[in-house]
Amino acid sequence: MAKFCQYCGKPLEEGTLCNCEESVAAQAAAADASSNSAAPTGGGFGDKLKIAFHNLIPFVKSYFKSPVDSTKSALDNNDLPLASLFVAIQAILSGLLVFFAVKGMLGSMGGYVKVPFFSLFFYGLLAVLLSFFTAALAIFLIGKFMKVSIRFSSAVIACGVGAILPTICAVVLTLCGFLSVQLAAALLTISLYVSITTRLVAAKSVLGADQSGKFYFSFIIGLGAADLVTSLIITRFLSGMLSNFAMGALGGLGNLF
């Protein structure tokens, strides 16, 4: 499991302490204070998940300073629980945001259209999970195509820890959508660039790369295919959900007469 300084976010080797000013001051303060701030240890997945929660904020700080180095640190430590935690947070937030966004748009119907929470939440959840796994699969296949030694779990970890920025963008985008459609549209373009950039960081971190034209060509084709597959599957689910909305809207309007 990776360990990060809780003060500056610097990745740490097992059994080492950070030498930043805040960490040194905390170590000198008292032995009991030092033990209270230490991450829980253990060998099971549950214990590793506790460590992932402990490392959450320090890793975010580290990622903003150096995305590639932070991702490589997670890969070196095979930090699947931390990656899973970031993806779970993004998926849950996306499910909630989709629900509240649709509910806000249908608010003008005066409450005659029932907005199904679980259907919309599941749609947002599914969109994130599908996008995540297809991107990880694409990076894994790119590695095989380029004859790089790579495990699928490594692609999963790299894409997982890269979910930080897209999650923040999704929250900001949805909040701005309530204020201005034009502003939301402008931010949507930015969020797409952010998503592409985080995937590129994930691919570079895993493949260690040979940043040649072959790599970038494979990245564009592979991730483009992943997005296409995700869009087709999500559209299939969305069409059924929209049909139910239409029936609900017609039924609600019928109650007015």
Image: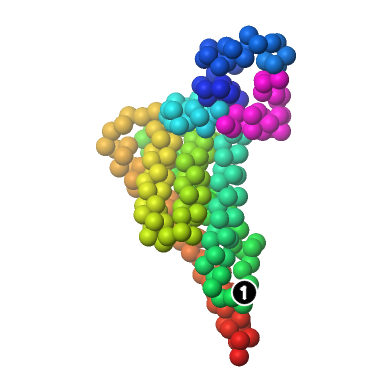
Quadrant (top left, top right, bottom left, bottom right) of the C terminus: bottom right
233 or 187, which is in the foreground? 187
Q: Residue at x 54, y 70 (%)?
A: 106
- x 65%, y 11%: residue: 29
Visible in this render: residue 155?
no
Q: Is residue 202 magenta?
A: no
Compared to 174, does 85 lie above or below? above
| The N terminus: image quadrant | top right
Figure label count: 1
Q: Is residue 49 magenta?
A: yes
Q: Mark 1 belongs to which amino acid?
A: Gly
The colour scheme used to paint the residues is: rainbow
Q: Is residue 54 left or right of residue 61?
A: right
Mainly helix, strand or loop, the magenta region? helix
User: Depth check: 158 or 209 in front?
Assistant: 158
Point out residue 187 in the picture as x, y percentages from the top left corner.
39, 52
Q: Residue at x 61, y 68 (%)?
A: 115
| Residue sitting at the far front | 179
Q: From the image, tell me which residue sits under label 1.
A: 111
- Whole-percent x, y for residue 35 in the image: 70, 16
Task: Please give the range of residues in magenta.
Answer: 36-57
